[in-house]
Image (tube, rainbow, N blue to C red):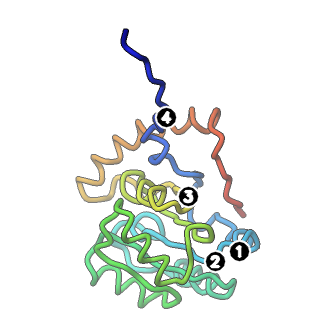
């Protein structure tokens, strides 16, 4: 007789689902997050803060000053090359950066927290892509917030292909938000 063993397998899809999904980075109430104990915030750049490959605009510059005034440590975590990320950082000033971060690998997120002096319990991540941003943040144990892309479909072709796969994942996420137990709504303005 063959014994039957019950093994609970955690679905990988849970690591692909953001802990929350909002319209825009700029709609998040970071003052309330600070009151909740968050001290570090990690951002993707392209289509999270500005359109793909766009320079920092006045809204982004004011936003990073506001984060600094609140008391946040902020960091840009990007898979882009250094010139792109450095130029954006120099414009917004109130943050640090890591380029060629290797997302969705955990190492970039862990390095980001080390640089900011934070840990997974008081750090939040904001990005627009599931297969790099959200997956990596979840794997690193950081609270993940997905935002709608600033300007969808005006990206490199490989990102456009990933968006189709992400659309399928987001269908599962919608079901998860109905039945899931780990939905942690981020405060919005």
Q: Is mark 1 on a helix, strand or loop?
A: helix
Q: Where is residue 122? Give x, y as percent.
A: 62, 71
Q: Which of marks 4 and 2 is nearer the N terminus?
A: 2
| Residue contact between numbered discs 3 and 2, judged by CB atoms under 8 Å | no
Q: Which of 138 and 187 is in front in this view?
A: 138
How far is mark 4 from mark 2, CA to CA?
A: 31 Å
Disc 3 marks which residue?
145
Q: Where is residue 178? Give x, y as percent.
A: 64, 34
**Relative to residue 2, is residue 170 depicted above or below?**
below
Which quarter of the image is occupied by the N terminus? top left
Disc 2 marks which residue?
39
Q: In this view, does 3 lie to the left or right of 116?
A: left
Residue that appears at 57% across and 36% down: 176
Q: Is mark 4 on a helix, strand or loop?
A: helix
Foreground mark, 4 or 2, reads 2
Q: Is residue 103 left or right of residue 20?
A: left
How far is mark 1 from mark 4, CA to CA?
A: 30 Å
Residue that appears at 61% across and 39% down: 177
Q: Is mark 2 on a helix, strand or loop?
A: loop
Q: Which of marks 4 and 3 is nearer the N terminus?
A: 3
Q: Residue 77 carries which label?
A: none
Q: Is residue 107 left or right of residue 32?
A: left
**Relative to residue 52, is residue 161 depicted above or below?**
above
Badge count:
4
Disc 1 marks which residue?
34
Q: Which of marks 3 and 1 is nearer the N terminus?
A: 1
Q: What element carries label 3?
A: strand
How far is mark 3 from mark 1, CA to CA?
A: 15 Å
Disc 4 marks which residue?
172
Neighbourhood count class around disc 1 (C-alpha, 10 Å): few under 14, some 14–19, many 20 upward:
some
Q: Residue furthest top?
A: 1
């Amino acid at each position: 007789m063959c014994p039957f063993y019950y093994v609970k397998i955690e679905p990988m899809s849970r690591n692909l689902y953001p802990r929350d999904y909002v319209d825009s980075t700029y709609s998040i109430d970071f003052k309330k997050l600070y009151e909740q104990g968050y001290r570090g915030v990690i951002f993707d750049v392209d289509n999270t803060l500005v359109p793909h490959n766009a320079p920092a605009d006045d809204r982004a510059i004011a936003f990073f000053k506001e984060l600094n005034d609140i008391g946040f440590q902020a960091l840009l975590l990007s898979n882009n090359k250094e010139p792109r990320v450095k130029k954006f950082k120099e414009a917004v000033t109130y943050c640090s950066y890591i380029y060629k971060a290797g997302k969705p690998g955990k190492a970039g997120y862990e390095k980001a927290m080390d640089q900011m002096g934070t840990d997974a319990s008081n750090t939040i991540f904001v990005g627009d892509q599931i297969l790099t941003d959200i997956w990596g943040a979840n794997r690193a144990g950081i609270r993940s917030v997905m935002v709608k892309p600033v300007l969808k479909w005006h990206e490199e072709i490989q990102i456009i292909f990933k968006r189709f796969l992400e659309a399928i994942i987001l269908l599962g996420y919608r079901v998860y938000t109905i039945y899931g137990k780990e939905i942690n709504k981020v405060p919005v303005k």
